[in-house]
Amino acid sequence: MAVAVTDVVEVLADLPSGPALGAALAAVDPARVLNNFLPELLAAQSRQSAHEAARMLGVLAEVGRARPTVDDTAVDRLEHPYLHSADEVRAALAWSRRAADAETDFAEQVVVELPAVHAAVLRGGDRPAQGAGVRPALLRAYARADHGRVRPVGARRWSPDPGAAGGAAAPDDRRHRPDA
């Protein structure tokens, strides 16, 4: 039976990140993989993990731009992230306020401002190093894409209601104001 598992593990290196790789990985029992093929299995799992984390960032960015509504059939996005979108993330995932704010801002930065970086990680082109997760991989790709000029992530959400939260935009990010 180890031969069949080995054949599957050898194929993993050629599969792009996504549903096919996910299905192939789900079929492999790591306890049955020959010792010398475990690093290949680990590399494929890391690629798939980066892909899934990039998809998560994509969904976070969509939540950030979804227009608040009570219409269950609406598919309506805002031009900029909604001021309270992190609260939606917080409620859905039971995250702390700080975690939801940070991840929502990070998703907006990567998905919208750095689409090439997001696409590279989505395809599994930049794998996380030393089990550190997808954020270091994205930041490494970002640093390469932007020649090492890494900007801090700031508040990027605005409210379509100018009277909400004291104004339309975060004070440190005027370019996201709808009237600017």
Image: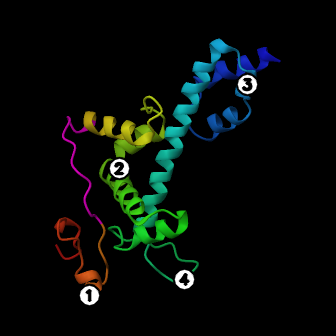
Viewed as shown, does residue 144 lie left or right of 13? left
Q: Are marks 4 and 3 in contact (CB under 8 Å)?
A: no
| Residue in the image at 42% along x and 29% along y | 129
In this picture, is 142 found above or below 110?
above
Inspect the image, locate mark 4, and give the three-letter code of the amino acid beneath it: Asp
Q: How is the image coloured?
A: rainbow
Could you tell me which quadrant the C terminus lies in? Answer: bottom left
Inspect the image, locate mark 2, and give the three-letter code of the amino acid beneath it: Val
Confirm whether residue 112 shows in the render: yes
- Give the structural element (helix, strand or loop) at label 1: loop
Residue on which the image places disc 4: 71
Residue on which the image places disc 2: 110
Q: Position of residue 177 (x, y in %)?
A: 22, 72
Magenta stretch: includes residue 161: no
Viewed as shown, does residue 180 lie left or right of 13? left
- The dot on residue 163 is 1
Inspect the image, locate mark 3, and give the three-letter code of the amino acid beneath it: Ala
| Residue in the image at 69% along x and 37% along y | 23
- The dot on residue 52 is none
- Give the structural element (helix, strand or loop) at label 2: helix
Could you tell me which quadrant the N terminus lies in? Answer: top right
Residue on which the image places disc 3: 31
Label 1 or label 3, whichever comes before in sequence order:
3
Q: CA distance from mark 4 to mark 1?
A: 23 Å
Residue bounds of the magenta highlight:
145-156
Tag in front: 3 or 2:
3
In this picture, is 108 found above or below 79?
above
